[in-house]
Structures are given as C-alpha cells and as structure tokens.
Amino acid sequence: MALVACFGPDDCYGVAWTLLHLIETGPNPVLATDPGPDANEWQQRLFLRAVNGGLIP
C-alpha cells in the first residue's frame, strides 16, 4: 500500500509503469475498492487492471 502513494501526477519517464508492475507482482490486489474519481490516474489504472484481470469482482 505504501508504494501506491508513490505515484505522481505524470509517468516520470516510465518509472510509473515500473512501479505499477512492481505493485502487481504482489500476492493480492492492493486496491480492493474503487479509489474514487479524485484518485491519481495511476491508482485508477491499477484498480481497473485488477478488475479486468478478474482479481476483484
């Protein structure tokens, strides 16, 4: 969960994708609930990827 807070407003020269993939390698989805409309773009993307992957109903 601490890594989710590291996302910034941009992709930081590709570091955000690396961070996203690092978080996804964990055993369980980090964001089990919708982060909401005011959440960072990367947090929303992380949640939607977990939903699309079937990890979250």
Image (tube, rainbow, N blue to C red):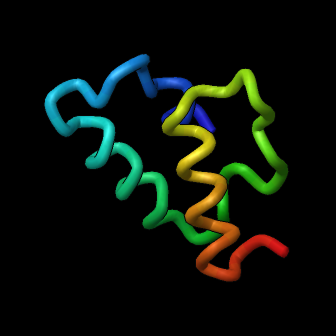
Residue, x 30% and y 47% (percent of image)? 17
Provide residue 24's location: percent of width, then percent of height: 48, 62
Q: Is residue 18 left or right of residue 47?
A: left
Q: Which of 28 and 38 lies nearest the eye of the viewer?
A: 38
Q: Is residue 56 above or below residue 29?
A: below
Tally of marks: 0
Q: Is residue 23 above or below residue 8?
A: below
Residue, x 47% and y 53% (percent of image)? 23
Q: Is residue 11 left or right of residue 56?
A: left
Quadrant placement of the N terminus: top right
Residue, x 49% and y 38% (percent of image)? 42
Q: Which of 37 and 28 lies nearest the eye of the viewer?
A: 37
Q: Which of 48 and 6 lies nearest the eye of the viewer?
A: 48
Provide residue 47's location: percent of width, then percent of height: 65, 53
Residue, x 63% and y 66% (percent of image)? 50
Q: Is residue 8 left or right of residue 33?
A: left
Q: Is residue 21 above or below residue 10?
A: below
Q: Residue furthest bottom?
A: 54
Q: Residue furthest left?
A: 13
